[in-house]
Image: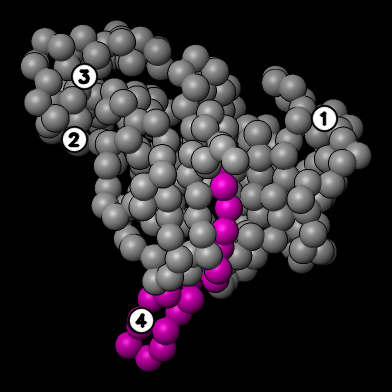
Amino acid sequence: MTEAFLELRDVTKSFTLPAREVVALSTTSLQIEQGALVCLLGPSGCGKSTLLRLVAGFEQPSGGNIIFHGKPISSPGPERGMIFQDYALFPWLTVRQNVAFGPRARGMGRRSAGDLADRYLDMVGLNEFAEVWPHQLSGGMRQRVAIARVLANDAKLVLMDEPFGALDAMTRERLQQELLTICAQTGLTVLFVTHSIEEAVLLGDRVIVMSAGPGRVVSDLAVSLPHPRDPTDASFNDIRRGLSEALHGGHSAAPVANGEPQQ
C-alpha cells in the first residue's frame, strides 16, 4: 500500500476553559495524497482552523496521530507553510525581503535568497513591486506575497486558512485561478479552508465536509470536473447541491459526483 503524503489517524483536540472543556475535533481521520488540492468546508467553529494548526505543528493533538511523509508532526517546519487571511507579512521588510526571509533564516546567502525571492515574485506577478513595503500593496497583492514567501521556503504542503475571504469578488476570483496555475506548475499539495461551497468546488480535487463542533468528517468528495470549472454548469451545481446537503445536515454519507458515490 502506498504511504499517504499526510495522514490524520483518529485525531482529537480539546481545550480547557475556566468553566468547561471544549472538544474542537472529534476522532478525525483522513488521508491526503501528494499534489492534491483538498478543500475543508464547514461552519464556523467546526475545527477547520484547529486542524490546520495541528498539521502546521503549532499545536499538538489531544489524541491520535498526524503523520507527514511517514513521520509524526511534533513542531512547525518550513516544509509545511501556512497562509492566513490577514497575510501576516513583516511590515518592516520590503516585499523582496519578506519572501527572502525564510531562506535567509536557514543560512542562504543574501544574493541567492534575493534571486530565489525574485523567482517566486515573478511567478505571482509582483517582480516590479519587490522594493515596496507591504502597506503600499492592495490586499490581493499582499496575499500573493504571502504565497511567494511560502513557496520560497520550499514548502511541500501549503495550509491556507480562508486566504481569500477578506478580498473583493474580482480579486478573489483572480487569485483562485492563480493558485490553480501555481499548483499545476509546482505540484504543491494544498489543504485549503473555506466557508464557501462554490470556492471549494471551483478549486478542490477533493472537498471534505466537517460537521458543526465538535468537528468530524461527514463527507469526503472527489471532484472530477476538469479545470477551468464553470459555476453555471449543471454538473458543477449538482456537486454544489450535494455538498450543501452534507454541510447543512441533510445526510452524513458522501455526496454523489458524476454518478459515483465517494467512499
Q: Which mark is residue 96?
A: 3
Q: Mostly what secondary structure, the magenta segment?
A: strand
* Corner quadrant of residue 180: top right
Res 85 seen here: no
Q: Quadrant of the N terminus?
A: top right
For numbered disc 3, what is the local secondary structure?
A: helix
User: Which mark, residue 163?
Assistant: none
- Nearer the observer: mark 4 or 1; the answer is 4
Q: Secondary structure at mark 1?
A: loop
Q: Please name the residue shown 35% across and 31% down the image.
A: 155
> Around disc 3, counting alpha carbons within 10 Å, would you say few (fewer than 14), some (14 to 19), or many (20 or more)?
many
Residue visible at 37% across and 91% down in the picture: 19
Q: Which residue is mark 4?
A: 16
What's the CA distance linking mark 3 and mark 1?
Answer: 39 Å
Q: Nearer the viewer, mark 3 or mark 2?
A: 3
Residue displayed at 76% across by 30% down: 224
Task: Identify residue for label 1.
Answer: 232
Residue at image point 15% right, 12% down: 112
Region of the chain picked out in magenta, as a range: 13-32
Label 3 – label 4 distance at C-alpha: 41 Å
